[in-house]
Image: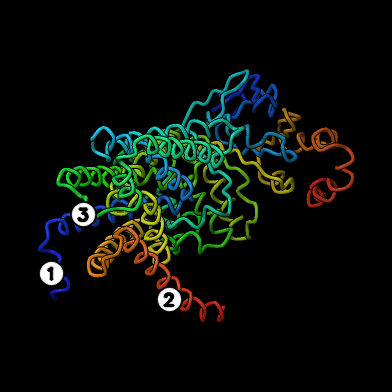
Amino acid sequence: MPAVSAPPLAATRGLTVAYEGHVALADVSLELPRGAIVGLIGPNGAGKTTLLRALLGMVAPRAGTVEVGGRVGYMPQLGPGAWDFPLTALDVALQGGFRRVGWLRRPGAGERHAAAAALEAVGMGALAGRQIGQLSGGQRQRVLLARTLMQEADLVLLDEPLSGADAATEQAFLETLTRLRDEGRTIVVTTHDLGWSAQHCDLLCLLSGGVIAYGPPGEALAADNLARAYGGALLEVGGVRILAPEGHHTH
Amino acid sequence: MHYLTDPLQFEFMQRALLAIVLTGIASGVLGSYVVLRGLAFIGDALTHAVFPGIVIAVAIGRSILVGALVFGLATSVAIATISRRRRIREDTAIGIVFAGMFALGVVLVSTLATYQKDVADLLFGNILGVAREDLLLAGATTVIAVAATLLLNKEFALIGFDRDMAEAMRYPVFALDLVLLGLITLAIVVSLQTIGNILVLAMLVTPAATARLLTHRLATMQVLSAALGVAAGVIGLYISFWWNVASGGAVVLTTTAIFFVVFAVTELRARPLAAVH
């Protein structure tokens, strides 16, 4: 992680987002440094996806500001229906470069090379010509990651990329995210897996309608923070079990 | 051979064949998106919504293609705009607009008793009615519809596959949806005279659905869909000529028959494989 004094890649100040009167996120002030993996955690409906959409400029803030000093890439969560579309893994990876290619033009040889390389980087090179519907859940996630790589973004936003991921996929994600971080890019990744985020993220943001805690995993995951985000009762029942893999760190 | 060549002596049959080829191409290419994006209902709505435009065009003696085009595009805008409001679901918006438009057409027809024969032709199609000007307009419309679709193919495919990503990439998704609906309207307009208003939907859905069974590639699906539409159109037209049955019905029955044959064959081929796994 860079020195604290370096200017952040992105920042929100007093960000409030509402959908039809319902406030999804209130008063979020965050600074995202360059070259960091930032985990976004919190219960369902905490506003994790909303924060990503605000960083992408897809939702207009009711109050506050969002500033991003670079290109933003995105990996959304995709419903099961989408995978019937007659596209190959390579076709999907190519989509990440469409804005670069521009209107009314097809991706050229350079784009195809880049897309093949992106698939190769996530261990999907051999399946580039496979129709996406014939891929496993983890393979599909890796194709979407390859597409995100094609965006060549400075700020990479990943929405639940590891849901339903197999070991190979988890490994490919970890290697890719680490490489992107080492290149000076910033990755924001939402996840339900507190153990994974504590282990692999440089910073954690604990959300529940607003920011509960933001800092290194050890600080952010303090028991009182978790209790405030997930509710004390839930923590006693499920929280301890979720955090169990982290137990050995405290020995 | 004379079964194939005899009908070609007639000028109306030459025009009808050209018109049905244009229908197959336009409907086939645009139909791929109708099938992939689940727009069959909206396609049905558009075919009905152009009805008042046709009636008015007949009444004032203008080209029905222009009348249909105006009402189809207006309906596309209305549906897309209404369904933008979250409280009204898209299928509800479609239902409101399409039933209202068709009712307008029905009311107009009832006031124009003398034109009812012409309008009946448009509802069910009439190959005898394809005039030279109609053919030119249908040709130009087909070229525009197909060229625009191919030029926007990568954006249409992205939106169809992953709308969220298209929005995140700052594509004007709403405007592109409107353009797609407009292009589908063009395809409907091309098909009106040969197939008839009521059966146009079949040309948008069936060849594309058949093509989807045969390929996993979008570009291949679009080409196959157009080819299947053209084949069904030509075969149906000959059936209509020799057996003296309604052209639109004959063409649609042909494409339906092709679908079921392909469906049966692909199912039978899939079975043993499924048993192995």
The residue under the point 30% across, 36% down is B67
Residue beneath label 1, please? B5
| x then y, percent, for residue B33 | 40, 50
Quarter of the figure with the N terminus of chain A: top right
Chain-order first, disc 3 or disc 2? 3
Please check whether the numbered discs 3 and 2 fall on a single chain: yes
Chain-order first, disc 1 or disc 2? 1
The residue under the point 69% across, 29% down is A24
Considering only vertical position in the picture, is B272 above or below A31?
below
Instruction: Pick out the residue farthest to the front.
Output: B113
Q: Is residue A241 left or right of residue A53?
A: right
Mark 3 to mark 1 CA distance (whole Å): 18 Å
Considering only vertical position in the picture, is B71 above or below A139?
above
Please check whether the numbered discs 3 and 1 fall on a single chain: yes
Residue beneath label 3, please? B128
Considering only vertical position in the picture, is A122 above or below A231?
below
The residue under the point 72% across, 33% down is A207
Amino acid type at image mark 1: Thr
Mark 3 to mark 2 CA distance (whole Å): 36 Å
